[in-house]
Amino acid sequence: MRLNPVFEKEMKRNSRSSRISWIIFVCNLLLAVVAFVCYFGESSQLGYLAPVSYSVPMNCYILMTYLLFILVVLSVPAVAGGSISLEREKKTLDVLLTTNLNPWRIITGKLEASLGVVLILTVSALPVLSLVVVFGGIGLGGLLLMAGGLLLTGIFVGSIGIFCSVVFKRTTLATVLVVFLVVGICACTGLAYYAGLLQQEMTAAYQQIDVGGVIYLLLFNPFTSFAGIISRQLGNGREMEQLCYLLGNYGQNPLIHYLPEASAVLQLLISAVLLVTAGRKLNPLNK
């Protein structure tokens, strides 16, 4: 099977880049610190033979996966944000467009390179994450499912980065804008939810707060789908649904009942629209 030439070139560039090496080093260092604090901090107080100590590996797994999610959200824009604009700044974009590669293959090659960074981060973090497998509770299938959630996040964030890289000519501007957009989506939807909880606490106990359609903003948050995966691994799989019921009576609303799944589908649709739009804008025949 022949690989995308753009993907091959980007992976060779990334393999020689010290930036990717530093990203991997910092990622694994942070994960190791979290594992060390969880195991030797909490376990030393509870005792390894105490029944409650068996929750320590699960708590450690949750913290490490959420930290890995944050690192993916912050590292992918650094790669995808300059994918096209960097070619434009180096005066190689016009040469790339004159090859046999159509704009769609160029766009998908850049996306594959961004997902390659996600895959490298995930694989390099597996030795630390596999500590949970020793204690039980999470198997190889669970780790693969978690990796799939990170790849979904990489597709969503990478698509936003490639779109901004096509629209804006400066790499710095495109990268900063991607970070602000992604962090803004995660932060704003999260703050909107907690604002609803705060309003509920300030309201009389007998009154039921209802935020209405505002709850659907969680569909755009990549953390919603990822948290749903972790919830199905370590919980009853309905934690996200139960959190939504705190802000309104949604009954048998299928979007709320299948919130992580709906969020994943919406992220893929948005990613497809952004990639297609970026490909059309990149096509010199459409100018």
Image (spheres, rainbow, N blue to C red):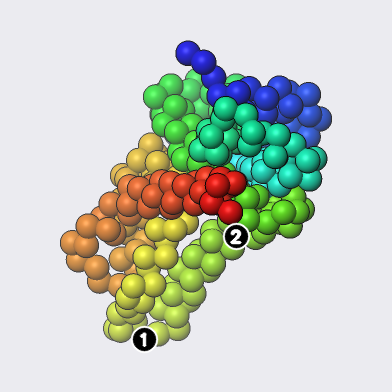
Do callouts 1 and 2 mark residues in contact (Cβ within 8 Å)? Answer: no
> 129 or 266: which is nearer to us?
266
**Residue 36 in sight from this viewpoint:** no
Q: Which amino acid does label 1 sit on?
A: Ala
Q: Mark 1 points at which residue?
A: 204
> Residue 68: where, in percent of width, then height?
59, 39
Distance from label 1 to label 2 (Cα)?
36 Å
Q: Residue 280, relative to residue 53: is it above or below?
A: below
Q: Residue 2, relative to residue 164: is it above or below?
A: above
Q: Which residue lies furthest to the top in this view?
A: 1
Q: Which amino acid does label 2 sit on?
A: Leu
Q: Residue 124, relative to residue 211: is it above or below?
A: above
**Quadrant, the C terminus:** bottom right
Q: Which of marks 1 and 2 is nearer the N terminus?
A: 2
* Residue at figure coordinates x 43%, y 21% from the top left: 140
Q: Name the residue under label 2.
A: 181
Q: For mark 2, give the secondary structure.
A: helix
Q: Which residue lies furthest to the left in this view?
A: 252
> Residue 38: where, in percent of width, then height?
62, 38
* Residue at figure coordinates x 44%, y 72% from the top left: 197
